[in-house]
Image (spheres, rainbow, N blue to C red):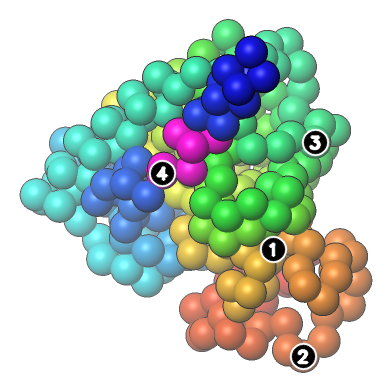
Amino acid sequence: MKLLRLCCLVLPLLALSAHADILGTADAFGVLGASAVTNTGPSVVFQDLGVAPGTSITGFPPGIVLGTIHNDDAVAMQAQADALAGYNFLAGLAPTGTLTGQNLGGLQLDPGVYFFASSAQMTGQLTLNFQGMNNAMIVFQIGSTLTTASASSVLVINPGSNDQVFWQVGSSATLGTTTDFYGSVIADASVTLNTGADITCGRAIALNGAVTMDTNNIDTGNCASVGGGTTPEPGTLSLLGTGLIAAGAAAPSSTFSGLGLAGALAAIRRRMRR
């Protein structure tokens, strides 16, 4: 009986660590819309940006895409197909916890699959504790909408290497003003990023509607990772080998080292907004 219980606990964890190809070619995209991608202000998309089967991409410039723009081409179409497959995979995972009716703000969650039967709301700070595990996943299965209040944030602590966060949203996702978000949002309908909302270590993908942006930074590569050489965002500070950097504390000049020009540019913009 004890052996059976152990298997029941271990098998879901093994499934949660096998995530390298969940999004396939869509993994290269920071932003991927279906009908359109619309931007206002000096947004920065650090990876590729695309749309398919729509053809409308507006607001670049003043927005900046550091990767490649794919407008209803074969690459964007394949990425949409792969994103849908990833969405279905995430939706099919067995939940390890049910959060229906709870506000994500104020919670601390470990690796697992968290289920909302309908909408999900985040007001304040959500803490994700990876417990030092490598290749771990935290997945949110949201039946309808995902909404964050202004100035909400996600704090990542005790990261391992190659940990990931996925938000599978049954309809639309809306990130409130200056939200500091973490993980990949794959919404069946649309994704809206209000003024100053940033996505760290993730992407915004709309399977049937538009991605709407307003002065945002979206970076799939700036992930919390022990020994990863990246600097976490102010709202997603990570427990590194040298200790936890306090939110809002003055940073030394080495803060931007290892980020490269693009990473430093985004970090400076975030500092200026705050």
Look at mark 4 in the image and give the residue it sits on: 19
Frontmost of labels 3 and 2 is: 3
Amino acid type at circle 4 is His
Q: Earlier in the sequence, mark 4 or mark 2?
A: 4
- What kind of element bears circle 2? helix
Look at mark 1 in the image and give the residue it sits on: 233
- Mark 1 packing: few (<14 Cα in 10 Å), some, or many (20+)? many
Left or right, 271 with reference to 45: right
Q: Earlier in the sequence, mark 1 or mark 4?
A: 4
Q: Position of residue 82 (x, y in %)?
A: 24, 39
- Quarter-of-image position of residue 116: top right
> Whole-Å distance between the Cαs marked 3 and 4?
22 Å
The image's mark for residue 108 is 3
- Mark 2 packing: few (<14 Cα in 10 Å), some, or many (20+)? few
User: Over which residues does the magenta segment extend?
Assistant: 13-19
Q: In terms of depth relative to the viewer, which is nearer, 230 or 233?
A: 230
